[in-house]
Image (cartoon, rainbow, N blue to C red):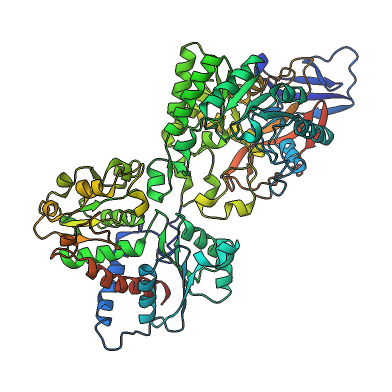
Amino acid sequence: MRNPQLTKNGELQHLLTLDGLPREILTAILDTAEPFTEVAEREVKKLPILRGKSIFNLFFENSTRTRTTFEIAAKRLSADVVNLNVSTSSTSKGESLLDTVDNLCAMQADMFVVRHAASGAPFLITQHLAANGRNDIHVINAGDGRHAHPTQGLLDMYTIRHYKQDFTQLTVAVVGDVLHSRVARSQISALTTLGVPEVRVIAPKTLLPAEVEKLGVRVFHDMREGLRDVDVVMMLRLQNERMSGALLPTPQEFYKVWGLTAEKLALAKSDAIVMHPGPMNRGVEIDSAVADGAQAVILPQVTFGIAVRMAVMSMLAA
Amino acid sequence: MNITISNGRVIDPANGIDAVQDLFVSGGKIVALGTPPEGFDADRIIDASGLVVSPGLIDLAARLREPGFEYRATLESEMDAAMAGGVTSLAIPPDTDPVLDEPGLVEMLCHRAKKLNRAHVYPVGALTIGLKGERLSEMAELVDSGCVAFSQSNVPIVDNAVLWRAMQYAATFDFRVWLQPIAPFLSRGGFAHDGEVASRLGLAGIPVAAETVALFTYLQLARQTGARLHVTRLSSAEGLKLIDQARAEGMDVTCDVSINHLHLCDLDIGYFNSHCHLVPPLRSQRDREALCQGLIDGRINALCSDHTPVDDDGKLTPFSESEPGATGLELLLPLTLKWAELSGVGLSTALARVTSDAGRIVGITKAGHLSPGARADICIFDPEAERRITRDSLRSQGKNTPFLGIELPGRVNYTLVEGKVMYEAVLSAP
């Protein structure tokens, strides 16, 4: 089965997942993003790379941050951006996902940035586009269910490379709700592909997917054991509705056992960096002292995110 | 009408026959094998040289989608599919709309099927009203109307006390109870086997325990109530192990597997292929191998199509939002033959699982074999002919199956029901 996000020549046509994407492509995206970080420092923060292109932000699930960063990235490349919050429009009128896509195709779209609550939804869109001979339209997955959030995974890799340079000497821990996290899946795919020798996940058994070790990670349930000597700590967001119920008893207990505090962070390497995809639950998965501390690189992540999204968009559509 | 089926390889698993010989049909029945009865004068001779002559197939689960889901399939379209697939007897699950919980509905279904005069229909009545798991259906009345067993299809009873009483009531009459092992809460919200594939794809998982916990309950209740239990659509090695244990303790229980679960596993989901969205979910490669072995040695008694026509709109959505199910009537024979080829099991054993062994579970005595006096339900097929499964090649209104685009062995040349040729393949000139 051919990876549906690559062309016959192995070039990136869509960005749907980092799972199965070759290391060369990941590295190329990170390299391409490098000069884009400087654009933000200019007086005129714009490049003409995507002038005349129409990009549709197609969000079937609410999101402000991710949508905004995609919008900024597209505008800095001079593309025309249309934001559609489909969760509040067509689907509530009964229109199917593919009907919506067909309508936007008829409006001469060049690119869709898609977020959807169902895993795999962007794959369905690319299959549909291919079946209708619309291979000229590119799709970027901005988060599908629990499956993938590839641009988040890439911006995390960019951040790690920025601070740590060489992936092949690192120990990285991903902490928290891996089970429901598309971010974690994309991070794990990218880290293993880029040659990180030890990727750890730290979580209670209720928040780990089945056979997670087959994704190439080492499983820890004990935070102190798992954080020992790591170079990078990647915290995950815990959704409110999962904090108390059959998965976890209370947010307080979660914080006590798996919350990142200065005391637990002290077990990691002294120059370890702390990352979080945002938005953070202070006092649940992370203590404010750590979130705002010297080791946190959470805001640089956001800044790099724009450059990485510019890189992906320009590689796909320029 | 007298028909001679000449020179075919007659395979009749129930009678241990596998030899090239003639078969004689008269008055809707099989009258003789080998030598014609005295004074037999054939009105038609079917040359079956190079072909296999087998009992017509008996399918333990064929959803014809009537009443209620006519936009997915109709009795006409699915009967055509059955005939083209060499399937001459169909057990019909009760999950129509309305549900088969009323004698009048069952009579209507049997009447409509009889008028179409193709495959024989064996309705499986709802164990509880509306499959809701609250009130018992009128089982005695339903049997009078033609029901051969009672089931919940794939809608499990939540309240085990109701299940216990339903099995007790069925056991009062010695009625058959067919149950699909699904623990309602453990399977809730899941779409795929809880293993590496679901974890990678971010699909909510259904653990094997959803099958074993339910199965353990069913076996315990069957033991206590004396109900005649048939377990439908096994999906896991652990499930099969529970059946083995129950049998070792002397329990009389039967079980089946679907063609999908015999040939596919969770890896086949690939990049979210909604054709592989099935109930139960496709499990691991190891589970598939155990099911295959179970079917070879007869610990799994029968193979069925679990025919579930789903329209395109039901499949052209993200995996988790798609309708589960796949069309299968026309694939039952090809996938039986493919399984025989891959596993090295003999043709006679393979055919037994879709004829006589399946017939025993339904309680069909006069078909599923080729004994003189049996109903002349016969499938004549070319086991060597390869056929590519395409949307156009399927007569069923349901065009969705994981096997689209795949070449499979077995082409049905003739299907006879009660001694009448109901299907004849149009063969291009050699």
Residue placed farthest to the bottom in the image? Answer: A43
Residue placed farthest to the left in the image? Answer: A270
Asked whether the viewer can see residue B79, the reply is yes
Residue B197, quarter of picture: top left
Q: Quadrant of the C terminus of chain B?
A: top right
Q: How many marks?
A: 0
Instruction: Report the side of B95 relative to B37 (left or right).
Output: left
Instruction: Using the image, determine if residue A52 lies above or below residue B16.
Output: below
Instruction: Using the image, determine if residue B30 lies above or below residue A199.
Output: above
Q: Residue at x 45, y 28 (%)?
A: B212
Q: Quadrant of the N terminus of chain B?
A: top right
Instruction: Using the image, determine if residue B13 lies above or below residue A191.
Output: above
Picture coordinates of residue B341, whole percent (x, y): 55, 31
Q: In this view of the protein, which residue sits in the foreground, A153 or A179? A: A179
Instruction: Report the side of A16 relative to B370 (left or right).
Output: left
Picture coordinates of residue B299, whole percent (x, y): 52, 20
Residue B426, quarter of picture: top right
Q: In this view of the protein, which residue sits in the foreground, B268 or B360? A: B360
Q: Residue at x 40, y 54 (%)?
A: A147
Instruction: Report the side of B275 relative to A233 (left or right).
Output: right
Picture coordinates of residue B190, whole percent (x, y): 46, 43
Picture coordinates of residue A270, whole percent (x, y): 8, 58
Asked whether the viewer can see residue B49, the reply is no
Instruction: Using the image, determine if residue B228 lies above or below residue B129.
Output: above
Instruction: Report the side of A224 relative to A304 (left or right).
Output: left
Q: Residue at x 63, y 47 (%)?
A: B310
Q: In this view of the protein, which residue sits in the foreground, A62 or B70? A: A62
Residue B100, quarter of picture: top right
